[in-house]
Image (cartoon, rainbow, N blue to C red):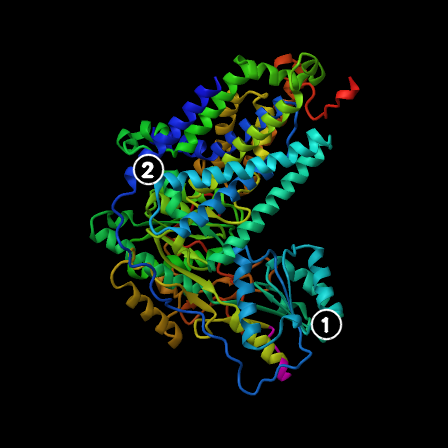
Amino acid sequence: MNFIAQFLQRAILQGTPLLFGATGEIITEKSGNLNLGIPGIMYVGAISGVIGGFFYQNSVKSVNPFLAIMIPLLSCLLGALLASLIYCFLTITLHANQNVTGLALTTFGVGFGNFFGGSLIKITKSEVPYVALTKIAKYYHSSFPFAKKLGWFGTLFFSYGFLVYLAVILAIVATVLLKRSRIGLQLRAVGENPATADAAGINVTGYKYFATCIGGMVAGLGGLYFIMDYSGGIWSNNGFGDRGWLAIAIVIFAMWRPNLAIFASYLFGGLYILFNYINAKMQLLPIIQMIPYVVTILALILTSIRKKRENQPPASLGLSYFREER
Amino acid sequence: MFKRIMALVLAVLMCATMTVALASCGEDEKLGEGAELLPRNTVTKSEGVTIPADFKIGLICLHDENSTYDKNFIDAFKQVMTALEIPSDRYFIKAGIGEDDTCEAAARDLAGNKGCNIIFADSFGHEQFLKKVAPDFPNVQFCHATGTSAKTAGIANLHNAFASIYEGRYCAGIAAGMKLNEMIKDGKITAEQAVIGYVGAFTYAEVVSGMTSFYLGAKSVCPSVTMKVRYTGSWYDQGKEQEAATALINNDKCVLISQHADSLGAPTACQQAGVPNVSYNGSTYSAGEDTFLISSAINWAPYFQYIIEQFCKGETIATDWCGTIATNSVVLSGLNLDVIAEGTEAKIKEAINAFKAGTLHVFDTSTWTVNGQHLTEYLADVDGDFTGETNVIHDGYFDESNADSFRSAPYFDITIDGITNLNTVK
């Protein structure tokens, strides 16, 4: 039982940044914006949190737990918000191509993260190129003190930092909001048919801006989680890897439903670490790590064949809205 | 609805803050990291060497200085440039050069356009491109780290270099073995539970040689130690390395971890699990103040100085060159004084002195077996064709990285008793 609990625990830890990214992307896509800049925004969120945390950690002798959490958190949200606003301004206000803008934003975000990450590394004069925010990261990593006493149950449910729970809460809240609230209904209307929504008096531009910015900020938290919780406060350039793309794959796999994204993220997280638990030969690693993407392709094929309306992406996804074209 | 959500999010944040606030009390003063056991020496220009005013040198790096591997080269390179008073307009660093034809283009640019007298490339995969370029520029010296074919290629201006890092690994292994002894003595583990976990990148001889020397160092002070190895199939992947280390700790019951991969994945896993860690490529003390023990690394400054001064004196550069502890090519960080076992420093210094005196051989065949047998002969792949052809065991030890007789790049690729590979076919 312990073995399974430990595997699932690691799968959840691996899946959490994916869940933040997927939830953020689903919220964004529901407004009709295909934001392929999410991987970049996650990088920007991560490095923004690191910058905030770095200057706080280095400016005080003893760290205040509240500020240790709030400064990186707010820095991350601000960084992700600004990155999202770039995307919004280009695609919504200037009607630029969403795919190109998103891909450019990802390239920009990764470069932005590595540039400022590299700058911080230079300041630390570390022999090995990394930034260690271990003093503040331990507050992100703190779990319930009674987790260890509960055996496998504690390992599975109570051994995480608060961002892991926040990721689940945000996914559930997003599900409820999208399905059962007026805001969600109007947002979906904007994503399905912005012209009709506009005719019904819904502020299309406002909703697109709002959803893309909120989605970007949620995704940015995935980057922050990876550095401050999973990596124990260690920033290394390119350490976040290609998790942003996995998050976008999960959006398709979960058929644009945040609640399904919880399961999908943990599944992808589990597949990512599976090779350690089945002692797969190293030569099989690439095949095992290919599984999430193969599953995503299969999900795409199946949903395309079945053509169930509720499993389709928003109808106007990826299209700019020109009011004059109505 | 929005207010309710905000209230929920704020409540979660407040709970988290309260929980962690309780954990923040009572931090003890730490002794920190001690002085480096084998420090990087200050580089000083050798007597009688004059660097010509038109001398130029180029460095080709796989990544930039934000990569653990490449930073080690770049820092040493700059250190030597400063010491030899070579101004910044006469040395060139080409970073982010892949192991593809961009390497050939970079080498041609440095040799042809920039007018470099020496070109150094830092990654194994660069070698094949240097081999293509070197014959076209016979007056330019092409030097290459970790390469295997300078001796067999028949190109006079192509050179290989490495360092006997296995000696540094052995010393780091002593720190691990001493820590295990302390854990056994304190009753935390039994002698049989002294299991080390090792995160390796690939099954290459470079990794196998490093981990075996580390294991033999630990075994020299803790005879009951065994080691389990997990490979990640990547030189740099934070997630995979961290997960491999975590699996070694949680499932394979390893009580101490070391690694040969470039990210901070394994040290982070150790810090989070409270398991001692022996690091590589430089000190990672600040990433694991409660778990870091020691780290070993190759110092490339002696080789950079050697090739420049040989060139400037008009003397030939060795076709293959292997730095040692004696040449300051192998360095050791300080010990984490809060974590190491008593007597560690003395034991390591004893080994260092023995290496310098030539009385200690890491791969002494009397200290390890393969399937219960002590080896008296082993045909290693020295010429880089992936087939063993040269006996490298003589005088009772496996003669690793002997640049004069064999080659500098490691060729120890044997899985010895006591080491279990968990995810390879070997």
Instruction: Name which of mark 1 and mark 2 comes first in the sequence.
Output: 2
- In the rendered structure, which amino acid carries the disc numbered 2? Val
Secondary structure beneath dot 2 equals helix
For the residue pair B398 and B137, the one nearer the viewer reads as: B137
In this image, B38 relative to A90: left or right? left
- In the rendered structure, which amino acid carries the disc numbered 1? Gly
Viewer can see residue B106? yes
Locate residue B213, reporting x and y percent: 41, 60
Q: Residue at x 73, y 65 (%)?
A: B108
Q: Residue at x 23, y 47 (%)?
A: B188
Q: Chain of mark 2?
A: B
In this image, A58 relative to A118: left or right? left
Locate residue A319, reporting x and y percent: 72, 25
For the residue pair B256 and B77, the one nearer the viewer reads as: B77
Question: Splitting the image into 4 quarters, where does residue A276 fall?
Answer: top left
Q: Is residue A112 above or below residue B50?
A: above
Magenta residues (range) = B312-319
Q: Which residue is mark 2?
A: B20
Q: Which residue is mark 1?
A: B115
User: Which residue reaches farthest bottom?
Assistant: B48
Q: Is disc 1 in the same subunit as disc 2? A: yes
Q: Residue at x 43, y 33 (%)?
A: A163
Circles 1 and 2, Cβ within 8 Å, touching? The answer is no
Q: Is residue B72 magenta?
A: no
Viewer can see residue B205? no
Locate residue A32, reporting x and y percent: 66, 23
